[in-house]
Amino acid sequence: MQVFGLPGHVIRNAGRVSRLLGAQTTTIEATRRRDAVARWRRAMKDGLSADQAAHAVGVPRSNA
């Protein structure tokens, strides 16, 4: 099907927009993991070792 009368950029970006509209929101668990990683990185930046930072954040090092 060909659409007449729409600017080319609208037609080219239609696929991108439909993917954005269909994207699912982040889960609570994903938000918790992202928060834990951010806290772990801050602890590492403050001079803690990876093990100490993971312990301070409260997650196993394998998850950080």
Image (cartoon, rainbow, N blue to C red):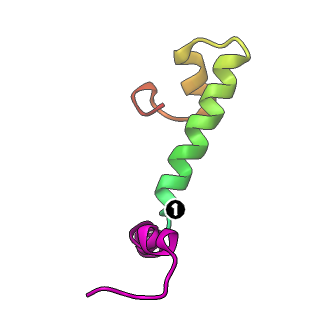
The image quadrant of residue 42 is: top right
Please tell me which residue lies in front, 36 or 3: 3
Please give the name of the residue rendered at 46% of the width and 68% of the height, measured from the top-left corner.
Answer: 13
Is residue 53 within the magenta segment?
no
Please tell me which residue lies in front, 18 or 60: 18
**Which quadrant is home to the N terminus?**
bottom left
Q: Which residue is mark 1?
A: 28
Q: What is the total number of numbered labels drawn onto the structure image?
A: 1
Residue 36: % across, % down:
57, 40
Residue 62: % across, % down:
39, 28
Left or right for 8, reference 48:
left
Please tell me which residue lies in front, 57 or 15: 15
- Compared with 3, 64 (above or below) is above
Please give the name of the residue rendered at 42% of the width and 34% of the height, measured from the top-left corner.
Answer: 63
The image quadrant of residue 35 is: top right
Q: Which residues are magenta?
A: 1-24
- Compared with 2, 57 (above or below) is above
Residue type for callout 1 = Ile
Is residue 6 within the magenta segment?
yes
Please tell me which residue lies in front, 6 or 24: 6
Left or right for 56, reference 30:
right
